[in-house]
Amino acid sequence: MGRREDLAANLAAVRERIAKACEAAGRSPGEVTLVAVTKTFPASDVRLLAELGVTDVAENRDQEAAPKAAECGDLGLTWHFVGQLQTNKARSVVSYSDVVHSVDRPRLVTALSHAAAGAGRSLRCLIQVALDEAEGRGGVRPDGVRALADAIAAAEALELGGVMAVAPLGADPAPAFDRLAEISLSLRGSYPTAKTVSAGMSGDMEQAIESGATHVRVGTALLGGRRAIVR
């Protein structure tokens, strides 16, 4: 079986999982956007996924994402940046990303705003919320979400899109996703258009969808085990 056939079969299986999870939660599959996380996989896979109907693609390392996005610039995809982001990478990330899921501090808001305004672009920003005590995973504590939302909403060339989180390691993800849903609901009280809830990956997308996720970030279930980093 060729790579296109592999990806088509994986995509069908992932879409079926999303459909079943939505049915169980009393939701429409149209409410959930599949974001294909293509880190470590080549631009040729992005092209194949686009041919198969995938419209949203994510990367988590600028060094890999920038050339890949440039190579696939003719495909009309929505590019998501989902990794932790250093302020000195803001200009590069803004050059190709439509959505940044990992905004977690005021300095990053400022850097992204300056970069987006300078590039004449509008950038959609999601607040990454830390739902556990693990170090090195990024995210703002729940009690800091409102202040960061205010900063994004006030920043030039940025749009507040909603929230994102990664489930705690080694624990039932459902309580964390429920907490993220509560944070999202509270945020929408002040910012009604900030409706995105980015949660759930290959191993826990069903729990995320049950809790109201609007975007699931799927890599392994779609593309297979991670390859060596593409240079």
Image (tube, grey):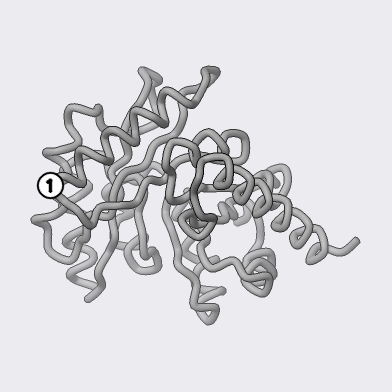
Q: Is residue 182 above or below residue 162?
A: above
Residue at position x 49%, y 78% in the image? 76
Residue nearest the viewer, comparing 57 with 32? 32
* Corner quadrant of residue 91: bottom left
Residue at position x 13%, y 54% in the image? 153
Residue nearest the viewer, comparing 159 with 105? 159
- In the image, 53: left or right of 194? right
- Tell me where residue 203 appears, x and y as whole percent: 62, 34
Quadrant of the snapshot with the C terminus:
bottom right
- In the image, 71: left or right of 175? right
Residue nearest the viewer, comparing 19 with 1? 19
Residue at position x 61%, y 40% in the image? 202
Q: Residue furthest bottom?
A: 74
Q: Residue furthest front?
A: 26
SS at badge 1: helix
Return the residue at label 1: 190
Q: Is residue 181 above or below residue 85?
A: above
Say which amino acid is labelled 1.
Answer: Ser
